[in-house]
């Protein structure tokens, strides 16, 4: 027969263990998503995933190094470029395949650096968290050639003053290029879905600021095509990732898909 | 030479023998002589049978034979052989002399003298040369001819400035002018370089019907020892501004074997292309491909020339002119793409804004959802792919991307087939997962148009791709579309370094009339056709198998400034729209006419669905070189559907512009502008050697003779024996020909010698 104090001690220990376990789970969940490492997803979800080109479109995520990683030599378990990877990528591809006639890879991830020659096989690229983005000379040259020859890049998941880093990095790539504000009349918002208003309060980080859409035009000429698009104070990837859970409102994730599909259709036609 | 020898032995010229008839004029004395000879013959035989000595039978037979031959000749002579021939009575007959008055006679290839100097020497005045000889026997009527014959009486009328030589017309003309007169024959002095389009046959037939012989004298050399000639140049009649053309230039030469010369192409004085070439072997014409871009609009006169080399006898044939009407207008291509893909984007990107080619595209982004780009207004293609022929035929060419056959209705399939066949448009099908047999096109009307064979049982396995390196074929390398570099070597080098592409359509064979321009080699070294072309009906069709030629633009190995991908697509699309007719399509029988000649202008008029119209009102507004404007109504020619003609007289030399407007029931059907030139031709200087063959043919078929200028001494006499005109019968005794005496003496000596050898006395 355990004494009351012993019982209490046991309870306390059990409680601490439970909390520790829960905390661990929560911390893990916070870092890696509610469903952990997604082992049940199958192949090609490692950070080195690279699709074998066969003519089809693929959701191509750009991998970069951050300044702190380069400085400390230590790499985070989930790097900033890999936010929402791979569920965002796959969910988006599924929606794209359902809604449009775009022929794409749906079961292979695609992660490439900017200086990888294979990047040229996928003229539409996506970068998450450009606020932490740094580049080497080779990467800058790679992105420059990619964009000037006809490539298109999407910058997503950044807020507040991250945009300053984006501007600085892009100036390294294309010194003369300028980001310009886009309004809802631009063809990219009508390439598939009709997005007639860009609600500044619709951003995922609307508490940090208004959602803004910025773009770089070829030769800075607004009549020519966009070569880059960036949505400030917004995180489409996050919305795609959690679209099949109850975590985000359906309206918001739907809008996120609309933007994504429009970006891709625009990149395939302009 | 032969003639002189013949005359020595036979006393008469060969012409007399060929024209005359043999006859024997036997008299009673002949028969007496015959009897005597018969006796002598008999005695001979008897004598030789009985001869002693060591003569063998064979020798005796031979000797007997010789003796009998002698007696035979004497017998024949006793019978008075005669040659009866019709000879022209002096001064009772006419002879027509035709003198070539064209520019080719000024070529100085006869010992440094122009050909015309012979004419001047022999026919310059009646007191010298051949003219004197002829005038003594005949009444001479002299004519000069180049494009048509004209009577001349004085030497000074010969200017040798004619820009054509029409031998047939000259002969017929002179024959008709001298009809009714007693003409012994015609004498034609020419180099035989006929520039007429029609054959000589008709003229010769006319002469044969009247048994009028022509005696020809060929002046000039049969081969020019040192000459370079630019032969035929075949260029398209029209071209779109900015197109690169590949043209074949035929070169021939003599005397400059293996030498390097520069072949220049000038566009109204501006050099547009120059290349160094090695001349082919003497006598063999070689075809040299020349590449240049037409950048200026309007009627352009292009000169293809080789600069004159030292010692060339004729330098006027070193350049050829060709006329190309360069059109500066917008040509619309309809591009229907079935799925959003990069190939679509990069093809559109290759054609810049403001280019003469406008790509109006319709891309299907989702089921029943389309995006339009490059449209003129909100109404164009508002109902997706055209459903009427009028709407579809408004475009010049059609590109179909990865779009399955089921996305089009049966009527739309037929419309596409008629688009190529009847409208004369171009069709290009691009490779992709929903294209060709993989897209269900096998057995459809569109499959009939395509240059490849589609087999629904032979498909590319789903999910697999072919990875190929693409290269031009031999046939492809001769076209402008495969030129990726400034010259052949640079182009071949570029093809070798282009990145691989992928294809998802299996094509095992092409149609019989199709040409494979590019082939792809896959990893197993198998070759597959990549770009195939064929003519179909009035139009043309292409199949382009790679689904991602955009890799030629985006691949990491391609520099940013590289324009290979853009140039390839621009050339291909230009070829696609090349030659596609309008609703009003003008045509001229020849682009150049002689000043004073009339040009025949033809126009093909069709309605918006390209059905010929025979009841349109067609007016041609002609602007002459001096600026005067005149109107000419064109009328249906009554024979060919939709074809209207008018004859336009030209007076002044220079460029003429013809603007054709067609209206029907008050509505404008269409307009077109075309140009032509009135200028003297330079055909005289091409193939300007002496054509002995032509002259021989004329003389032999009409019963005359061909002479070299050196051997014309017998001409005047030979003309006497043509048997035509006012003639008398001449009898020539043949028994006193020197040959007879020689034969007799020869045979007697032979017999005597033989007898001595054999041992008989």
Image (cartoon, helix red, strand yellow):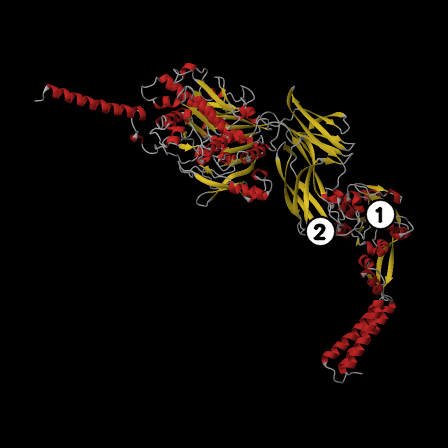
> What residue would you read off at disc 2?
B254
Image coordinates of residue B20 in percent, x first then y, are: 82, 58
Q: In the image, is B533 to the left or to the right of B113?
A: left
Q: Quadrant of residue B613?
A: top right
Q: In the image, is B23 to the left or to the right of A172?
A: right
Decide which of B215, A264 is in the foreground and name it.
A264
Q: Which of the numbered marks, if any, corresponds to residue B97?
A: 1
Decide which of B223, B695 is in the foreground and name it.
B223
Decide which of B470, B193 is in the foreground and name it.
B470
Of the two numbered discs 1 and 2 in the rendering, the one whose residue sits closer to the viewer: 2
Q: Are marks 1 and 2 on the same chain?
A: yes
Residue found 64% across the figure and 36% down from its top:
B236
Residue found 38% across the figure and 15% down from its top:
A207
Q: In the image, is A29 to the left or to the right of B499?
A: left
Residue lying at the far front of the rendered structure? A71
Q: Quadrant of residue B266?
A: top right
Q: Chain of mark 2?
A: B
Q: Tag 2's secondary structure?
A: strand
């Amino acid at each position: 027969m355990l004494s009351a104090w012993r019982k209490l001690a046991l309870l306390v220990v059990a409680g601490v263990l439970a909390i520790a376990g829960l905390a661990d789970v929560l911390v893990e969940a916070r870092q890696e998503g509610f469903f952990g490492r997604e082992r049940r997803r199958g192949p090609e979800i490692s950070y080195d995933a690279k699709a074998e080109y066969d003519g089809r479109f693929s959701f191509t995520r750009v991998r970069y190094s951050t300044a702190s990683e380069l400085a400390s030599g230590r790499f985070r378990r989930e790097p900033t470029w890999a936010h929402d990877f791979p569920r965002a990528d796959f969910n988006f591809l599924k929606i794209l395949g359902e809604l449009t006639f775009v022929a794409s890879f749906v079961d292979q991830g695609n992660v490439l650096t900017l200086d990888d020659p294979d990047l040229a096989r996928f003229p539409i690229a996506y970068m998450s968290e450009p606020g932490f983005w740094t580049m080497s000379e080779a990467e800058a040259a790679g992105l420059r050639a990619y964009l000037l020859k006809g490539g298109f890049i999407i910058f997503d998941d950044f807020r507040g003053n991250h945009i300053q880093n984006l501007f600085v990095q892009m100036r390294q790539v294309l010194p003369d290029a300028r980001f310009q504000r886009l309004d809802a009349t631009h063809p990219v918002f009508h390439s598939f879905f009709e997005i007639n208003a860009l609600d500044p309060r619709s951003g995922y980080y609307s508490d940090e600021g208004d959602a803004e859409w910025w773009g770089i035009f070829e030769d800075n000429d607004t009549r020519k095509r966009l070569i880059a698009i960036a949505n400030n104070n917004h995180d489409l990837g996050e919305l795609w990732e959690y679209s099949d859970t109850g975590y985000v409102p359906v309206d918001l994730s739907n809008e996120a898909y609309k933007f994504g599909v429009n970006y891709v259709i625009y990149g395939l036609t302009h | 030479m032969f003639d002189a020898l013949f005359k020595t032995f036979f006393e008469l010229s060969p012409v007399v023998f060929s024209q005359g008839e043999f006859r024997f004029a036997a008299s009673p004395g002949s028969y007496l002589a015959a009897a005597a000879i018969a006796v002598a013959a008999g005695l001979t035989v008897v004598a030789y049978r009985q001869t002693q000595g060591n003569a063998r039978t064979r020798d005796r037979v031979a000797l007997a034979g010789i003796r009998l031959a002698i007696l035979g000749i004497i017998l024949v002579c006793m019978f008075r052989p005669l040659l009866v021939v019709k000879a022209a009575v002096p001064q009772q007959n006419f002879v027509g002399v035709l003198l070539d008055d064209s520019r080719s006679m000024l070529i100085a290839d006869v010992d440094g003298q122009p050909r015309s100097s012979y004419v001047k020497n022999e026919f310059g005045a009646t007191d010298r040369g051949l003219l004197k000889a002829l005038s003594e026997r005949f009444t001479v009527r002299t004519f000069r001819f180049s494009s048509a014959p004209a009577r001349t009486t004085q030497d000074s009328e010969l200017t040798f400035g004619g820009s054509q030589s029409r031998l047939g017309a000259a002969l017929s003309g002179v024959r008709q002018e001298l009809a009714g007169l007693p003409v012994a024959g015609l004498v034609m002095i020419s180099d035989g370089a006929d520039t007429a389009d029609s054959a000589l046959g008709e003229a010769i037939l006319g002469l044969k019907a009247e048994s009028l012989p022509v005696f020809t004298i060929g002046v000039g050399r049969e081969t020019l020892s040192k000459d370079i000639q630019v032969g035929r140049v075949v260029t398209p009649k029209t071209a779109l501004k900015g197109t690169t053309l590949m043209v074949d230039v035929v070169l021939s030469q003599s005397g400059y074997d293996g030498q390097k010369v520069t072949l220049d192409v000038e566009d109204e004085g501006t050099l547009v292309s120059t290349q160094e070439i090695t001349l082919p072997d003497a006598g063999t014409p070689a075809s040299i491909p020349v590449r240049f871009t037409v950048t200026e609009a309007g009627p352009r006169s292009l000169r293809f020339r080789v600069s004159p080399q030292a010692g060339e006898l004729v330098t006027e044939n070193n350049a050829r002119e060709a006329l190309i009407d360069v059109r500066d207008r917008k040509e619309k291509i309809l591009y229907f793409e079935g799925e959003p893909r990069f190939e679509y984007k990069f093809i559109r990107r290759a054609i810049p804004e403001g280019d003469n080619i406008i790509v109006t595209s319709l891309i299907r982004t989702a089921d029943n959802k389309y995006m339009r780009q490059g449209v003129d207004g909100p109404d164009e293609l508002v109902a997706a792919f055209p459903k009427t022929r009028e709407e579809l035929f408004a475009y010049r060419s059609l590109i179909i991307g990865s779009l399955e056959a089921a996305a089009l209705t049966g009527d739309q399939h037929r419309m596409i087939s008629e688009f190529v066949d009847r409208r004369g448009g171009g069709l290009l099908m691009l490779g992709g997962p929903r294209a060709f047999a993989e897209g269900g096109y096998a057995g459809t009307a569109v499959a009939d148009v395509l240059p490849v064979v589609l087999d629904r049982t032979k498909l590319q396995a789903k999910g697999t791709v072919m990875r190929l390196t693409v290269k031009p074929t031999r046939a492809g390398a001769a076209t402008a579309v495969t030129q990726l570099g400034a010259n052949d070597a640079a182009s071949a080098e570029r093809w070798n370094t282009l990145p691989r592409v992928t294809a998802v359509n299996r094509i095992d064979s092409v149609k019989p009339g199709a040409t494979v321009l590019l082939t792809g080699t896959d990893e197993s070294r198998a070759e597959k056709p990549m770009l195939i072309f064929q003519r179909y009906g009035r139009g043309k069709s292409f199949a382009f198998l790679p689904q991602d030629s955009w890799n030629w633009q985006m691949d990491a190995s391609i520099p940013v400034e590289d324009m290979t991908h853009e140039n390839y697509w621009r050339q291909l699309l230009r070829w696609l729209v090349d030659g596609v007719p309008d609703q009003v399509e003008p045509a001229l029988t020849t682009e150049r006419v002689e000043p004073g000649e009339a040009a025949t202008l033809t126009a093909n008029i069709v309605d918006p669905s390209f059905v010929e119209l025979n009841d349109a009102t067609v007016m041609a507004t002609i602007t002459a070189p001096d600026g005067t404007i005149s109107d000419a109504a064109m009328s249906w020619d009554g024979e060919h559907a939709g074809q209207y003609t008018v004859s336009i007289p030209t007076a002044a030399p220079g460029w003429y512009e013809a603007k054709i407007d067609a209206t029907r029931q008050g509505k404008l059907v269409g307009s077109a502008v075309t140009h032509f030139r009135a200028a003297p031709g330079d055909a005289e200087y091409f193939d300007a050697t002496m054509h002995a063959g032509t002259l021989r043919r004329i003389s032999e078929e009409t019963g005359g003779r061909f002479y070299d200028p050196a051997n014309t001494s017998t001409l005047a006499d030979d003309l006497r024996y043509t048997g035509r005109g006012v003639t008398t019968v001449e009898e020539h005794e043949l028994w006193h020909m020197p040959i007879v005496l020689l034969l007799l003496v020869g045979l007697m000596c032979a017999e005597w010698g033989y007898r001595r050898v054999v041992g008989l006395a």
